[in-house]
Amino acid sequence: MKKASDCKFAYAQRSQPFLEPRKTPVQARSAASVNAILDATIQVLLRLGKERLTTTKVALRAGVSVGTLYQYFPNKSALLQAVLKRNLDEVTTAVELVCKQQEGATLRKMATALITTFFEAKMKNAKTSIALYSVSSDVDGAKIVQQMGVRWNKAIVKMLGSSCEPLTKDPELVAWILQAAVTGVSRNMLESGAPEKDAHTLHQELIVAVCAYLDVCSAHDSAKSESAIGDADRELSDAAR
């Protein structure tokens, strides 16, 4: 089994030249300009879609000159990649924070807090999350997701290792399963066409599923779990005869 840091999530990869910002803002005024440009990029993306989004329209929406925009972003792809990075960094930072806060807790409490925090971060701006999924493959989104996934894995592994209920399985494997479950369900929910309608139910069901998995992985339930797995294997063998 590969480590989470080596796993690639289901985004199409495509190399794109000149995606990095031209320069990094160092003064408060510059940072404010960049944030205004990124906010405007999201607004234009939501209103017009990625095909009709242009640097000129973004600059107009942000209230800056096209020249100012080009000081930081060389083209449309760089703009979209920067917006995607900012969004994923905000979600990842929220995950890292909740993992830190849950150190020493029970596995079930950890899972509930992690899933709740992630869903809240994604649903805070559901339309933005959906729009960014649509541009991800155009701006090397898989690489960004992989980078954020490494941070996720590190935070979750550390949290799990601090639990008052020791794991009987590799913490990195358990952390990868949690990541895959949470991100997979949330993406399917957001792309379902009615994320607000489904969010509460999927949130609750995911907690149930993940907590059940963690019960199997915890020391106090390991004997019971191994017995149940053995029974299931015997039933499958009998059925195959």
Image: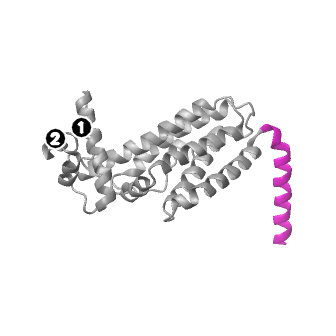
Magenta stretch, overall SS: helix
The residue pinned by badge 1 equals 33
Q: Is residue 226 left or right of residue 139?
A: right
Which is nearer the eye, 151 or 71?
71
User: In 3D space, how far apart are the residues under numbered discs 2 and 1 (Cα atoms)?
Assistant: 9 Å
- 51 horizontally vs 210: left or right: left
Mark 1: which secondary structure?
helix
Please indicate, yes or no, whether residue 240 appears anywhere in the rendered image: yes
Q: Where is residue 148? Give x, y as percent.
A: 46, 42
- Rendering coords of residue 11 (x, y %): 44, 56
What is the secondary structure assignment of the residue under circle 2?
helix
Is 36 drawn above or below residue 205 in the view shown? above
Rendered image: mark on residue 126? none
**Image quadrant for the C terminus?**
bottom right
- Residue located at (27% from left, 47% from top): 19
- The vertical placement of 93 against 128, above or below, is above
The image position of residue 85, as x and y in percent, is 38, 44
Q: How crowded is mark 2: few (under 14 residues within 10 Å), some or many (20 or more)?
A: some
231 inside magenta stretch: yes
Question: In this rendering, would 29 be left or right of 158?
Answer: left
Q: Name the residue under label 2.
A: 68
Decide if residue 50 is in sight here: no
Marks 2/1 in contact by CB < 8 Å: the verdict is yes
**Highlighted magenta segment, given as a residue range:** 219-241
Along the polypeptide, which appears first: circle 2 or circle 1?
1
Which residue is rendered at x = 66% and y = 52% of the image? 204
> For this rendering, which residue is in front, 29 or 227?
29
Circle 1 crowding by C-alpha within 10 Å: few under 14, some 14–19, many from 20: some
